[in-house]
Image: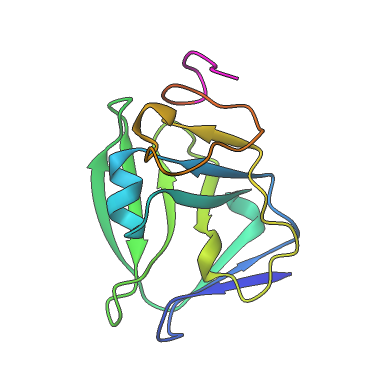
Amino acid sequence: MFTASCGCGQLKAHCDGAPDSIVQCHCTDCQKRSGSAFGLGAYYSRSAVTIAGVSRRFIRKAASGADFIQFFCPNCATTLYWTTERHPDGMGVAVGAFDDLADTKPVRSVFENNRCAWLEPLKIPTFKKGRDSEQIR
């Protein structure tokens, strides 16, 4: 069991086991969501995650046009987890919010066309946009 929590500790995601995948995303929405050069998400099936605490949600359109729903703590505003209309049985959890996640190496990088020039690319499958777009390496 791995636990991710918001900055104030009020909102938690209890995750059963290791994530199915860890993905590095360079889209401008993830840059804004994370406040960093990229977002890093641990992806689970929804049935493997139990949420405790109160959250609020923000819905935006992803590059695909589908709804991307971000859930954040109403006290400290940490975005802790998200779901997508395209993958209704899945859930992403912010890697930086985990207390202890053994292996945080991403398995792929997406929206590489938005990667900050100073950021060295990893030696993992890399896609121009989403994972169903042109693979660069």
Quadrant of res 123: top right
In terms of secondary structure, what is the magenta stretch mainly? loop
Residue name at image x 41 percent, y 30 percent:
111
Q: Which residues are magenta?
A: 131-137
What color scheme is it? rainbow
Q: Is residue 44 left or right of residue 28?
A: right
**Residue found at x 52% / y 51%:** 41
Residue found at the far top of this picture? 134
Q: Where on the picture, by quarter, is residue 7?
A: bottom left
Up-down relation of residue 29 to residue 74 (above or below): above
Q: Position of residue 72 (x, y in %)?
A: 34, 67
- The C terminus: image quadrant: top right
The residue positioned 67% from the left and 50% from the top of the image is 105
Q: Is residue 83 above or below residue 1?
A: above
Q: Which of the two residues, 130 or 93, is positioned nearer the viewer here? A: 130
Magenta region includes residue 136: yes
State whether residue 127 is above or below residue 50.
above
Q: Nearer the viewer, residue 101 or 1?
A: 101
